[in-house]
Image (spheres, coloured by chain):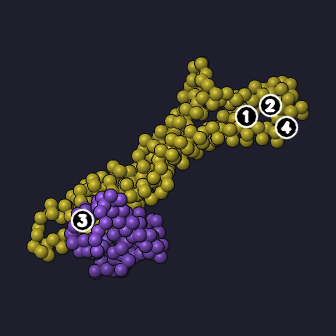
Amino acid sequence: MPNPDWLEALRVELRRQRLPAEYSARLMEELSDHLVDVMEDTMSIGVRDVDAVHRRMGAPRDVARTAATEFRRRGFFGRHPLLTFVALPIVAAPVVWISALFLVLGMAGVWKFSVNQGWAAAELSANGIGWLKFGCVMMMVLPTIAAAWAFGRVAVRNGLSWRWPLFACVILGAFIAVAGVDTRWSMVPGKSQMILSLGFGLGAKELFYEAARFAAPIAVACWVLTRATRGEPTAIAS
Amino acid sequence: MLVLQVLSDRAMHGYELVQSITARTAGALEFGEGSIYPILHRLEAAGVLAGKRELAGGRNRVVYRLTPKGRKHLVSTVHSWRDVVAAVERALEGGERAEPRLA
């Protein structure tokens, strides 16, 4: 029988290292087999010292740390977290923002928005204008939320610390909080405007929306990370 | 490199591999035996090793074998290692200032 204390201690340490459940389960399965071999080996020479077995296997903390280090070395993102979670969002946030704006402008062009034959506020209901404004904001928020989800998944898949994706999401959140898109609707065709801005609003309403935009990617990353920790490795004692 | 070298002879499961490394190094290298599996898994993910569940020693275990990519990797790693060892050896002997040895 493998020593359940050693395996249980290892299970706790692996969980602490935030390694994916499937990887931890396979590791524990093989280590459980190895532990059986070591115990049979030591008992065959008349030694019944459990500590000697543990010394041969290595401390659970050390094994878990080696597992985490080796697991992170497997992929680019695990080997270069600084580049992935700090440099990439700094570059990606403005690129995503500008891309979203071009998309909005492109769509506006397709709809003949703000050209001579374009729409006027008179042609749109209040609800319609509200939805268009909401759509403009979502053009920025949705790619950021998708990026936050991706950063969370990359961290989970590479067994990385939570601080990396959360830091990336703080950068993303800060950017979309200050980057604003607004629309001004005119009754005269061709005079409606889309306003792009960078900066903080001063009113309570603006600050509330900025705080919500800042928190959105962080909340998404937290959701991805907490969901991933629910799957725990199980000790396989055979 | 040591893992690849041992597995270049024949396929082994983890416990057998550890025993083989201990025997080949005459027990000179001390390491927690449990740490060998994360290394094997990384090498497997890199395509250098292939692991497969097989019946070995009366139990169903993961047996690891070297892939063709692993053999190439082993050759280049051994070559690099020998270069490093030779360079360090030269440095320990005094480098360019060392007296030429008499035959």
Residue A76, relative to residue B10: is it above or below?
above
Q: Quadrant of the N terminus of chain B?
A: bottom left
Q: Residue at (55%, 41%) from the top-left corner?
A: A89
Say if residue A233 shows up in the picture.
Answer: no
Chain identifier of the purple chain:
B
**CA separation, marks 3 and 2?**
78 Å
Labels 4 and 2 positioned on one and the same chain: yes
Q: Nearer the viewer, mark 2 or mark 1?
A: 1
- The chain identifier of the residue carrying mark 1 reads A
Amino acid at the residue labelled 1: Leu
Task: Tell me the quarter of the picture where residue A112 sits.
Answer: top right
Report which residue position mark 2 lands on: A124
Numbered mark located on residue A217 in the image: none
Marks 2/1 in contact by CB < 8 Å: the verdict is yes
Q: Return the disc, 2 or 1, that comes first in the chain's sequence.
A: 2
Element type at marker 2?
loop
Horizontal and vertical percent for residue A166? Answer: 47, 40
Horizontal and vertical percent for residue A145? Answer: 57, 42
Report which residue position mark 4 lands on: A112
Report which residue position mark 3 lands on: B29
Horizontal and vertical percent for residue B27? Answer: 21, 69
Element type at marker 1?
helix
Q: Residue at (12%, 74%) from the top-left corner?
A: A45
Residue A147, relative to residue B49: is it above or below?
above
Element type at marker 3?
loop
- The chain identifier of the residue carrying mark 2 reads A
Left or right position of B33 against A111: left
Report which residue position mark 1 lands on: A132
Q: Nearer the viewer, mark 4 or mark 2?
A: 4
Chain identifier of the yellow chain:
A
